[in-house]
């Protein structure tokens, strides 16, 4: 069997894998990416957060992404009935980027993969991992291409950025269930011919509609005139709708006043897709000779668009620590990777929990929101969940409940 040698094998050509590969390649190490699918390919996670911009910039991807003309995103809007909570990233607590993009991920991910290839990283598509054997921190990975040809890849280190494929977690029994209740999504892309003219409110931000308790809708406009629309919630909500996936989604859209007229009868660009039970975790995020990044680590929920941010954050952090390891430097994976990533994951976990249990609804839709608190929350929504100067990051596990109680008392007294 053919065998080749690299310093680092990256499994997966999504944002986590390409960011990690770019940073490792810049340090002069030989990197290869193997990707099971053929690009472009569809994936959700279409609304980025400003924190992503720092990783795109350090990986050398920013100019390539700018050239695509994606829809700029300046904030996030939350709607409940006639109530609106609008967060503008230019008015946030933390220092950082004030905008980002909303992207069709098929185009975005291919842009990153093409750019990392241009930088000198070999990317092999339609190549899946069938076996990994570790010898200390060294490894031999067997891969197979679409034609059934197999080869072995020797590597000094592996970055698993395989996303929902979760190659190492599944191969070595590291998967563990999430603590979240099971949820389901049904979504498509719609030709948005009735998109409101008020672009400052509708075009350049994601809209999350609180449809029912524990059920919400995403509305993500793209620069192409297409809008991504999806329902998220308890599986039982979807059981009330029958017919084909398109008939089900059209019936759901008709039940929400905020979007019913806008999308009624409009063209669906593909049959609506479903993802169910998507929240997942892992028993450990690293081991001798490997690190898990992106959705191979943990995926929470799409409500705050955190997926791509965690992918790039973990790809960046994992890639930099892999470089230290390859240079023979001491790496404290627990402190510098696990604790770092869990700080961000746990902060967003508190916000996701607060959204579904109604705590954040009380805060977002308060009659007289505290503007300082709003700026601090805005920083979390922008992805700056590692800024411990922000009380909503430092005290994320308690502060939302406390603030919701204060809001309730104030409104009762008012």
Image: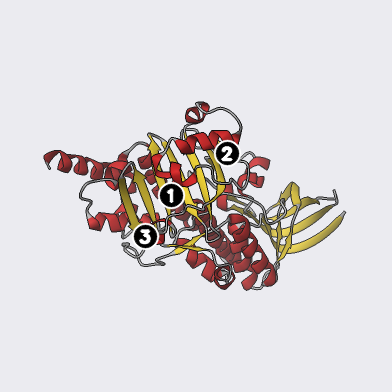
- Residue drawn at x 59%, y 48% is 296
Residue 353, percent from left and from top: 39, 40
Name the side, left or right, on which 196 lies relative to 390: right
Q: How far apart, in angstroms, are the residues tagged by discs 3 and 2?
A: 32 Å
Left or right: where does residue 12 sit relative to residue 204? Answer: right
Earlier residue among tags 1 and 3: 1
| Residue 375 in sight in this render | yes
Residue 100: image x %, image y %? 46, 63
Mark number for residue 394? Answer: none
Quick one: label 3 or label 2, which is nearer the N terminus?
2
For the residues labelled 1 and 3, the Cα–Cα distance comes to: 17 Å
**Residue that badge 1 annotates:** 304
Q: Which residue lies furthest to the left in this view?
A: 413
Q: Is mark 1 on a helix, strand or loop?
A: helix
Q: Residue at x 85, y 51 (%)?
A: 149
Residue 9 image point, x, y percent:
69, 59
Local SS, label 3: loop
Q: How crowded is mark 2: few (under 14 residues within 10 Å), some or many (20 or more)?
A: few
Label 2: which secondary element: strand
Q: Is residue 316 left or right of 377 when viewed as pictured? A: right
- The residue carrying mark 3 is 387
Q: Which residue lies furthest to the right in this view?
A: 1
Residue wearing tag 2: 275
Near-viewer residue (332 or 161): 161
In x, y percent, where is residue 48? Answer: 49, 57
Above or below, comparing residue 342 to residue 256 in the picture: below
Q: Nearer the viewer, residue 68 or 214?
A: 68
Q: Which residue is drawn at 32% across and 43% down?
A: 360
Location of the C terminus (image quadrant): top left
First along the sequence among labels 1 and 2 = 2
């Amino acid at each position: 069997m053919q065998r080749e040698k690299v310093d680092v094998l990256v499994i997966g050509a999504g944002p986590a894998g390409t960011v990690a590969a770019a940073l490792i390649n810049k340090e002069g190490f030989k990197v290869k990416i193997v990707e099971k699918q053929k690009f472009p390919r569809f994936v959700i996670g279409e609304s980025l957060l400003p924190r992503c911009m720092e990783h795109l910039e350090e990986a050398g991807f920013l100019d390539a992404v700018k050239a695509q003309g994606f829809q700029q995103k300046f904030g996030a809007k939350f709607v409940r009935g006639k109530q609106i909570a609008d967060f503008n990233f230019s008015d946030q607590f933390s220092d950082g980027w004030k905008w980002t993009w909303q992207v069709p991920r098929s185009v975005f991910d291919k842009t990153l993969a093409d750019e990392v290839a241009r930088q000198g990283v070999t990317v092999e598509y339609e190549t899946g991992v069938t076996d990994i054997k570790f010898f200390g921190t060294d490894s031999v990975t067997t891969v197979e291409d679409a034609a059934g040809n197999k080869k072995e890849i020797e590597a000094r280190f592996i970055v698993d950025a395989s996303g929902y494929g979760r190659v190492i977690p599944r191969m070595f029994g590291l998967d563990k269930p999430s603590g979240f209740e099971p949820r389901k999504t049904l979504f498509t892309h719609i030709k948005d011919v009735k998109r409101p003219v008020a672009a400052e409110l509708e075009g350049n931000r994601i809209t999350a509609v609180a449809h029912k308790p524990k059920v919400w809708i995403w509305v993500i406009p793209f620069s192409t005139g297409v809008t991504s629309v999806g329902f998220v919630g308890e599986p039982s909500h979807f059981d009330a709708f029958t017919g084909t996936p398109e008939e089900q989604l059209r019936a759901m859209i008709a039940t929400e006043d905020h979007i019913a007229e806008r999308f009624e009868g409009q063209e669906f660009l593909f049959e609506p897709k479903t993802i169910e039970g998507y929240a997942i975790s892992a028993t450990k995020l690293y081991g001798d000779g490997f690190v898990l990044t992106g959705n191979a680590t943990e995926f929470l929920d799409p409500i705050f668009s955190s997926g791509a941010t965690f992918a790039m954050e973990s790809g960046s952090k994992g890639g930099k620590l892999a470089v230290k390891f390859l240079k023979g430097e001491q790496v404290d994976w627990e402190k510098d990777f696990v604790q770092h990533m869990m700080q961000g994951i746990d902060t967003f976990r508190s916000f996701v929990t607060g959204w579904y249990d109604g705590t954040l609804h009380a805060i977002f839709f308060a009659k007289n929101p505290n503007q300082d608190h709003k700026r601090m929350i805005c920083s979390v929504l922008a992805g700056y969940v590692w800024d411990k100067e922000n009380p909503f990051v430092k005290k994320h596990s308690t502060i939302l409940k406390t603030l919701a109680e204060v809001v309730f008392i104030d409104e009762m007294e008012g």
